[in-house]
Amino acid sequence: ASSFSWTVKATGEKATDVATAKASGFNFRTRVYYGAAAAPATINSDFVKSLTASGLVSSKVKSLEVNGGGKYIWYCLPKSMGTCSFMSNNFPFDIQEPQTVSVTNDLGYNETYYVYRSTNQIDVTMKIEVS
């Protein structure tokens, strides 16, 4: 689950100690990865992590500016966030159907990612809206 809550109850050793309870919550956040790169022989966890990592996010909606540099543009997000669409300058951005890749972060957490790649190599800097 992306969020959950729990209650902690503390009691003292004596019968006269007051018991207290505190509810708290936790929201899980993960990263998306994006950038320009040549197509690797194998799209795997190491390749995904070689791209630019976002800060911790709770939404797939993002504005990107990527310099293609004659390479493909990649966007990778956790499968749990669902699929997404891409626009550039109010027009659909031509991107291939995503592949699924198992990605293990530096702390050992493993999650399945959708890995999107532009259909063509891009020579310019692109502003892309992801939703």
Image: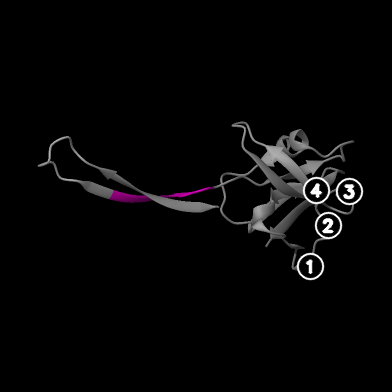
Evaluate if marks 4 and 2 touch, with contact meaning CB atoms under 8 Å apart: yes
Q: Earlier in the sequence, mark 4 or mark 2?
A: 4
Measure the alpha-carbon separation of dots 2 and 1: 12 Å
Measure the alpha-carbon separation of dots 3 and 4: 7 Å
Q: Main secondary structure of the magenta part?
A: strand
Residue in the image at 13% along x and 41% along y: 17
Where residue 9 appears, as percent x and y from the top left, is 28, 45
Indicate yes or no whether the magenta region holds residue 23: yes
In the picture, the disc for residue 121 is 3
**Label 4 secondary element:** strand
Measure the alpha-carbon separation of dots 2 and 3: 11 Å
| Amino acid residing under circle 4 | Ile
Q: Nearer the viewer, residue 116 or 26?
A: 26
**Label 1 secondary element:** strand
Where residue 41 appears, as percent x and y from the top left, is 90, 36
Q: Earlier in the sequence, mark 3 or mark 4?
A: 4
Residue in the image at 29% along x and 49% along y: 22
In the picture, the disc for residue 73 is 4
**Label 3 secondary element:** loop
| Amino acid residing under circle 2 | Ile
Residue hosting label 2: 95
Q: Earlier in the sequence, mark 2 or mark 3?
A: 2
Horizontal placement of 2 versus 7: left or right? right
| Amino acid residing under circle 1 | Phe
Residue hosting label 1: 91
